[in-house]
Amino acid sequence: MTTQTGGCLGILGLEPGLPPGVTPSAPPAGSLSSSATFHFPVISETVEGAWADVVMQGEPALEPAFVTAARRLVERGAVVITSDCGFAVRYQAAVAAAVTVPVVMSSLLLVPTLLRQLPPKVKLAIVTYDSRVFRDDLLGLSDQADRDRIVIGGTEGGKMLENASMRPPKPTDIADIENDVAACVTRLRVAHPDITALLFTCTGFPPITLAIRRMTGLPIYDITTICRMTLESVGA
């Protein structure tokens, strides 16, 4: 394990499922795992047993593995900790209690703030990896009036979900991710013309955020948004 010096963003990663000796491909521009996205080092630790489908179901038994990996990241120099799956927000409290640096496990932490930024009669659309397994407990909302302003869509039926469901997972071309997300956003806007902002929960979406922002003309928030804000707050 290589020790990093200075401020780093620490990522709690999912099981990559790569065969021994296979090196992962370089992260695309704008991605959570690219140092160029934040202009300073990014380090990661794999959470043992954290396969995507298991994390999305919120398996409680994974909590100790998330905590252990988070502590390793801090030892290596992480000044902010995040995760490589938006559904890992369910482990937010456990990880935040276990380390002494800010923890932002998911862009979903922004939901209450965004609702208060927007006019009360409009909607916030959450675009997620698979809306079929998205549960209201992920939102962190107690007011039904707030929940009624949220619409949720997913990329089920697309290439990204198909590829990620394989073991080992198969990488998805950026063009395919953009097509999947664009199709979802279009469906949501047809059904809900009062959508005025988008929140991307999947950490695989940031490389195409700019393209969808240009397509829709709407403000879009993702995991890199909350990570930049938190990193700036600690002066990293």
Image: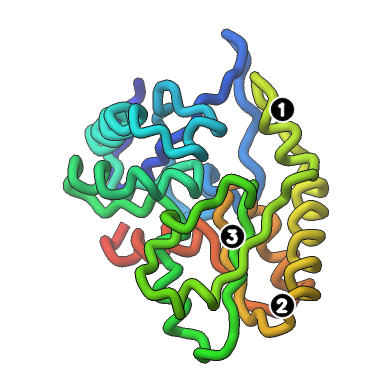
Residue in the foreground of this view, choosing between 174 and 109: 109
Whole-Å distance between the Cαs marked 2 and 3? Answer: 17 Å
Q: Which residue is mark 2?
A: 192
Q: Which residue is mark 3?
A: 200
- Indicate the amino acid at tag 3: Phe
Give the label, 2 or 3, closer to the camera.
2
Q: CA distance from mark 1 to mark 2?
A: 33 Å
Q: Residue flagged by tag 2: what amino acid is it?
A: His
Name the residue: 76% across, 60% down: 184
Q: Is residue 188 visible?
A: yes
Label 1 with label 3: CB-CB less than 8 Å? no
Q: Secondary structure at mark 2?
A: loop
- Residue drawn at point x = 72 percent, y = 77 percent: 192
**Quarter of the figure that contains the N terminus:** top left
Foreground residue among 31 and 38: 31
Mark 3, residues whose alpha carbon is within 10 Å: few (<14), some, or many (≥20)? many
Which comes before the other along the chain, label 1 or label 2?
1
Is residue 183 found left or right of 142 in the rendered image? right
Q: Is residue 20 left or right of residue 142?
A: right
Screen quadrant of the C terminus = bottom left
Q: Which amino acid is tagged 1?
A: Lys
10 Å crowding of disc 2: few (<14), some (14-19), many (20+): some
